Image (tube, rainbow, N blue to C red):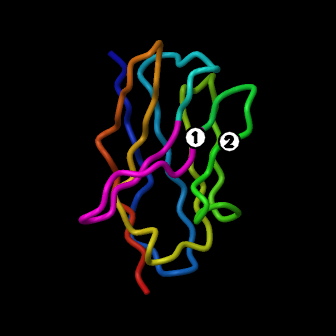
Amino acid sequence: QVQLVESGGGLVPAGGSLTLSCEASETIFSSNPMGWYRQAAGKQRELVARIRSGRDPDYKDSVMGRFTISRDNAKRTVYLQMRRLKPEDTAVYYCHVRNWGIDYWGQGTQVTVSS
């Protein structure tokens, strides 16, 4: 059972930056994806960014060029650097890992962007 601990959410003005971190309780094989999803109030959860070795990261179109995902396998951690934040980025952000075919989710961290 993989435990995921997220940190880094908060309140930021439009145009600001935040970096989210998610540490896994055990090693995630590098070819297994680690990523971030988000869920805004009244909307479905959606993929924001995903990373796995040997492939280019995947990004939601609306965050391309503003968000950067990275991972440190030695620290079992995935990061999401968010720049030029917009009010529409406001949501609960969830870390996701798929390890050997099983999906794991973090508890979620709130990101609020004020206009």
Left or right: where does residue 65 sit relative to residue 89? right
Q: Which quadrant is home to the N terminus?
A: top left
- Magenta highlight on residue 69: no
Residue 60 place in picture, x, y as percent: 57, 55
Label 1 Cα neighbours within 10 Å, binned few <14 / some 14-19 / many ≥20: many
Kind of residue at badge 2: Pro
Left or right: where does residue 115 sit relative to residue 105? right
Q: Which quadrant is home to the C terminus?
A: bottom left
**Disc 2/disc 1 C-alpha distance (Å):** 6 Å
The circle on residue 74 is: none
Q: Mainly helix, strand or loop, the magenta region?
A: strand
Earlier along the polypeptide chain: callout 2 or callout 1? Answer: 1
Label 2 Cα neighbours within 10 Å, binned few <14 / some 14-19 / many ≥20: some
Q: Which residues are magenta?
A: 35-50
Of the pair 25 and 87, the residue shown nearer to us: 87
Residue 68 place in picture, x, y as percent: 66, 53
Kind of residue at badge 1: Arg
Residue at 47 percent of width and 12 percent of height = 100
Give the residue at mark 2: 57
Give the residue at mark 1: 50
- Rendered image quadrant of residue 66: bottom right
Residue at 51 percent of width and 76 percent of height = 86
User: Secondary structure beneath disc 1?
Assistant: strand
Residue 104 place in picture, x, y as percent: 36, 27
Residue at 60 percent of width and 55 percent of height = 81
Residue at 37 percent of width and 70 percent of height = 112
Residue located farthest toward the left when viewing the structure as drawn: 42
User: Secondary structure beneath disc 2?
Assistant: loop
Residue located farthest toward the bottom when viewing the structure as drawn: 115
- Rendered image quadrant of residue 44: bottom left
Residue 6 place in picture, x, y as percent: 40, 42
Of the pair 34 and 22, the residue shown nearer to us: 34
